[in-house]
Amino acid sequence: MTPETTEAPVPRASDPQRYRAARRVTWIGVGTNLGLAVVKGIAGIFAHSQALIADALHSLSDIVTDVLVLVAVRLGAREADSDHPYGHARFETAATVLLGVILIGAGLGIAVSAVMRLAEGALPIPTWPALAAAAFSIAANEWLFRLQRRIGRRYGAASVVANAWHHRSDALSSVAALVGVAGAMMGWLVLDTVAAVAVALMVVWAGGRLGWDALRELVDTALDPDEVEQIEAEIRNTEGVQSVHNLRTRRMGPEAWVDVHIEVPDTISVSEGHQIAERVRRRVIEHRPEVSEVQVHVDPEDDEAGALLLPDRETVLAEVRDCTDRMDSTVALEDSTVHYLGGEVHLELSVAMPADLSLGEAYARADELRDRIRRRTRVRDVQVHLHVPHSEGRAPAKGPDPS
């Protein structure tokens, strides 16, 4: 009995519910950032806090990244088309790279701004409204961070998660502003610089991590080794699969894609091989929720090192027909199956013999035909099946070549 998975499936990038959730939480971010920019800007001006004014400008820049996320999620939600047959999920990945760069820039900006304020020396002493505005900004941005991270993880939206970390960087920059304002009010201006530089390093680290992960996806980095091992185990446990090779994986936004070669018994029909491949595909998708598509290549033998290109079917059968045409009595080729195994051509033939031949004579003709094909063609092995048409006083004879 097949075990059931307990993991929740990851929504596809084109899932309408995923798109609506990401859009809704991002619009909440736009409204919150706009409100924070207004509150911190007014408080910074009237409470004489340069740090708070800079933090207000930082919140305004967040609106730009929110809009970027909205555009990326909308583009990523489009279904596959002729221009993008694998879908549009990587629009979100590209946006995540850009957001990572913005986070790095924001962190460096915080550090440079803090050092420059300290170097300027004489700074006006801020008043208590600046403290209140900074505290309010910390609470609001931390709430946004937790909300967007939860939604982003639930729906596998990397750009939403990246934007959540941007809000965490805003909360941390507001912490720096709070510490700086409090330090300035107590005469310890150096606290502003120390806190800002520490926050800047955290922001740069978060941006670098997000950007690097997204960049690895863009260059088709494989899934984690543990995930690949589990996927391979599912494939090997599928009925009809003899071995697995050339297993490749990659990310496509929230989804994982798998390409694999499977070896099946070498003389089964094409339709049976297709059925085994379809069972592999469905088993992996069912048991590995992160996988949305599996491309399965069916091999009769291990071709990992490459396969020798052999004569095509028409070329082989043309040589076989030349052999049958040279037989003394009429031998009609009725059906044929060509196998390409071990770098050689193997052949199964069904031939019709004249009705006036005895069964022994028919077998002798089959032996002669097999010998001719082996000597005069590129076929390595031949199996001949006989069909002697029914005539009066003689039953039809059908059977394999006994030799």
Image: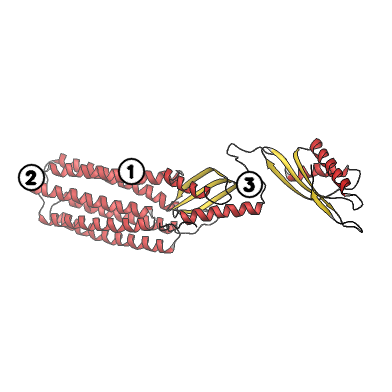
Q: Is residue 97 above or below residue 25?
A: above
Mark 1 or mark 2: which is in front?
A: 1
Mark 3 or mark 2: which is in front?
A: 3
What residue sits 47% from the left and 59% below the top? Answer: 78
Residue 368 in the image: x percent, y percent?
Answer: 85, 40
| Distance in Å between CA atoms under marks 3 and 2 | 82 Å
Identify the mark at residue 187; answer none if there is no mark.
2
Q: In which quadrant of the rendered view does residue 72 lie?
A: bottom left
Mark 3 or mark 1: which is in front?
A: 3
Marks 3 and 1, the one that precedes in the sequence: 1
Q: Which residue position holds label 3?
A: 265
**Residue 113 can be seen in this image:** no
Identify the mark at residue 208; answer none if there is no mark.
1
Residue 246 in the image: x percent, y percent?
Answer: 54, 42
SS for callout 1:
helix
Marks 1 and 2, the one that precedes in the sequence: 2
Q: How is the image coloured?
A: secondary structure
SS for callout 2:
loop
| Distance in Å between CA atoms under marks 3 and 1 | 48 Å
Marks 3 and 2, the one that precedes in the sequence: 2
Toward the left, the furthest residue is 186
